[in-house]
Amino acid sequence: MNDVEKHIGETWFSEHVATLTQHGDLQVLQWAKPGTNTYSGRYVFDGNKMYISGDIGEGVFWLTWKADIHSFNDIHVGYFEEKLTAYSGQRRDYDGTKARKQLEDWRIELIEEEVPFDIETFREMISAAESCSSKEEWALNCVNDEYSEFISELDADYWEWIYSIGDKMSRRIIGYLVGLKMASKQLKEKSGVA
């Protein structure tokens, strides 16, 4: 478990209780802290589809296997995200530190390729990217307005990549899988299978 997954498990789900019920062909997992809906989720397993709803958001997954509570234990979050076909939020969050690093790497590339550019404008753009709080803010305020001409002079095809700098997977999507794995472990421990 990486740091983000560990943090989600400890802060979102530390007191959650898993309740699994069977309804014909459907399995329903209720994952919640008793007495509250905070970070609660309902996972419905229907053949090779899984539907999630609740305080953790909504998502639909189309899988290549018959889903059940325990079928996600060895799944990596990147592969898990690939199975997401519908989602109630943004698939990507914005990380200003990551954006800064990506722009700094681009700056180094430009220097190595001996492409001339205004170093001060580039520094300002990096600082602006780091201080943005969302992809939308980066796209609207920085790329489309203030720095678009500067960027396009350095890379005519910038639009293919510049809008995705600072991207990181949504914590909600990561939380879906962390919750599934924690609930599976809890249910196994209750049944003595762990």
Image (spheres, rainbow, N blue to C red):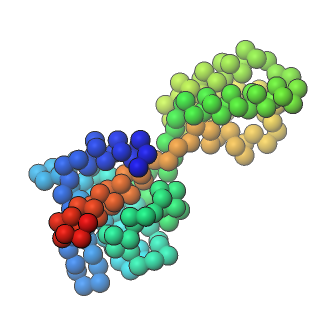
Position of residue 51 measured from the top left corner of the image (x, y, whole percent): 36, 67
> Relative to 94, is 34 above or below?
below
Nearer-the-camera pick, 66 or 51: 66
- Which residue is at the far top? 120
Position of residue 82 measured from the top left corner of the image (x, y, whole percent): 53, 62
Question: Viewed as shown, does residue 159 lie left or right of 34?
Answer: right
Nearer-the-camera pick, 100 or 131: 100
Q: Is residue 83 visible?
A: yes
Q: Is residue 137 visible?
A: no
Position of residue 187 measured from the top left corner of the image (x, y, whole percent): 22, 66
Residue visible at 29% across and 84% down in the picture: 25
Question: Viewed as shown, does residue 2 lie left or right of 110?
Answer: left
> Relative to 132, is 45 above or below?
below
Nearer-the-camera pick, 187 or 123: 187
Residue visible at 28% across and 43% down in the picture: 10
Residue visible at 43% across and 45% down in the picture: 2
Position of residue 89 measured from the top left corner of the image (x, y, whole percent): 43, 51
- Which residue is at the far left? 35
Count of number-bearing discs = 0
Question: Viewed as shown, does residue 81 lie left or right of 104?
Answer: left
Residue visible at 68% across and 28% down in the picture: 104
Viewport quadrant of the C terminus: bottom left
> Relative to 46, is 190 above or below?
above
- Which residue is at the far bottom? 24
Nearer-the-camera pick, 146 or 172: 172
